[in-house]
Structure formats: structure tokens, C-alpha cells
């Protein structure tokens, strides 16, 4: 557990309005330190298209090669792709959960959860151990994702995608948002076009 007064508490997260007083960390907490490089969020839809998967992999690979730590929410789709791409390219990644750090959600991403921990990266949450996710915990999680990141990249998402909540927080925190254009015929391009 890290409190706002601890040296290991992420400096970027401290700068947001009302940062969480307590942050739970599972894995290597030094992944949260800016001295190992800047961090950027890669977020988007759970229902990716082939285009979205390709773009997420390409841009995540480039960000890792440039020394960025990849922050995302361990959800299906873009989040899972960005975490796995970071790991496959020997990069750093931080998974932010909308539940306790001891609960992998969704269960389908248990192997990614395990890989994040085995490779010396970390999983974080502001929610206590054992807490299960609820509808309201995901917007709170998105706030932490944006707070840990210098900027937010939205690779694909519908017009009502939760990734737009993360982008909105980034804008409120004065951090840049990058939106990847996609095919005009795709519903999964409406979120980035809206941004």
C-alpha cells in the first residue's frame, strides 16, 4: 500500500485533483516511478476490429521502443492487446483495476494478469483487497489510468466507449489525448472521431 505521503507514490498521480490517498500495488512498485521512463495510457474498445488490433499493436510497440511505460485497464480488447504487446516487446506496463489488486477481472485475462506480475511490472487499484468490480468502479479506474499517464491514446472505440471517460479525465488533468482515425464506416471509429 502506498499513501500520498510515501516517496513511492506516483508523482503524476499526485498532481491530479483529489488523488486517491491510498493506492494498492501488487507486483513491482518501482514500475510506477517516473525515473524508469514516462508513462502513456493506451485504451479503447473491448470489441476490437482487425484494424484496431493492428493499430494498437503497432503504436504500443513504437511507444515501448521509445521508452514509455504502457498504462491500461486489463479489460478485454485494446487494454489486453496493449499490455501483451508491451510485455512481448520487453516493455514496462501498469494494469489499473476497477477491483482489488488480488482479483483478476475479467477472469479471461488471468494469463495477462500473471504475466504482468512475473515480468516485474505491477497491478494497481484504489480499491481494497477482495473488492469485486461494480459499475461505478470502472470510471474511477479510468481516472487513475489518466492520472498515471502523461497522455492518453485511444486507438478504437464506439461513441459511448468507456475509453472516452479516460480521455475526458486526461483533458481535465491538462494532459494530451491522441485519437487514432479509423474507417468512416466502422462504429468502432466513432469514439476517436468524436475526440
Image (cartoon, rainbow, N blue to C red):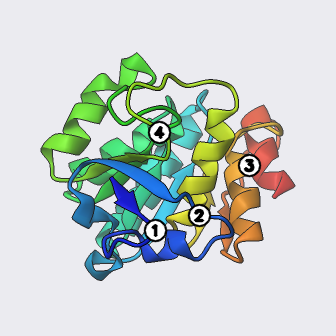
Say the numbered circle drawn on residue 19: 2
| Residue named by callout 3 | 165
Q: Residue at x 43, y 69 (%)?
A: 39
Say the numbered circle drawn on residue 4: 1
- Mark 3–mark 2 Cα distance, whole angstroms, equals 17 Å
What is the x, y in percent for residue 8? 31, 70
From the viewer's side, name the closer residue of 14 and 110. 14
Neighbourhood count class around disc 1 (C-alpha, 10 Å): few under 14, some 14–19, many 20 upward:
some
- Mark 2–mark 1 Cα distance, whole angstroms, equals 8 Å
What is the x, y in percent for residue 188? 72, 37
Between circles 1 and 4, the one closer to the viewer is 1
On screen, 186 above or below 34? Answer: above
Say the numbered circle drawn on residue 136: none
State which quarter of the image contains the C terminus.
Answer: bottom right
Give residue 154's quadrant in the image: bottom right
- N-term mark: 1 or 4: 1
| Residue named by callout 4 | 97
Between circles 4 and 2, the one closer to the viewer is 2
Q: Residue at x 71, y 77 (%)?
A: 174
- N-term mark: 4 or 2: 2
Q: Residue at x 69, y 69 (%)?
A: 17
- Mark 3–mark 1 Cα distance, whole angstroms, equals 24 Å
Q: Do the residues under discs 2 and 1 have CB atoms within 8 angstroms?
A: yes
From the viewer's side, name the closer residue of 4 and 161. 4
Amino acid at each position: 500500500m502506498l499513501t500520498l505521503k510515501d516517496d513511492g507514490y506516483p508523482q503524476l498521480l499526485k498532481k491530479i485533483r483529489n488523488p486517491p490517498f491510498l493506492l494498492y500495488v501488487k507486483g513491482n512498485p518501482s514500475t510506477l516511478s517516473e525515473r524508469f521512463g514516462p508513462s502513456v495510457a493506451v485504451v479503447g474498445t473491448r470489441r476490437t476490429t482487425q484494424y484496431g488490433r493492428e493499430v494498437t499493436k503497432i503504436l504500443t510497440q513504437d511507444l515501448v521502443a521509445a521508452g514509455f511505460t504502457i498504462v491500461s485497464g486489463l479489460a478485454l480488447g485494446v487494454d489486453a492487446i496493449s499490455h501483451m504487446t508491451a510485455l512481448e516487446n520487453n516493455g514496462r506496463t501498469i494494469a489499473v483495476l476497477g477491483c482489488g489488486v488480488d482479483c483478476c477481472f475479467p477472469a479471461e485475462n488471468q494469463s495477462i494478469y500473471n504475466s504482468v506480475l512475473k515480468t516485474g511490472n505491477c497491478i494497481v487499484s484504489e480499491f481494497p483487497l477482495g473488492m469485486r468490480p461494480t459499475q461505478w468502479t470502472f470510471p474511477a479506474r479510468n481516472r487513475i489510468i489518466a492520472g498515471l499517464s502523461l497522455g492518453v491514446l485511444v486507438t478504437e472505440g464506439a461513441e459511448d466507449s468507456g475509453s472516452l471517460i479516460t480521455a475526458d479525465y486526461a483533458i481535465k488533468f491538462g494532459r494530451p489525448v491522441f485519437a487514432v482515425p479509423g474507417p468512416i464506416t466502422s462504429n468502432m471509429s466513432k469514439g476517436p472521431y468524436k475526440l
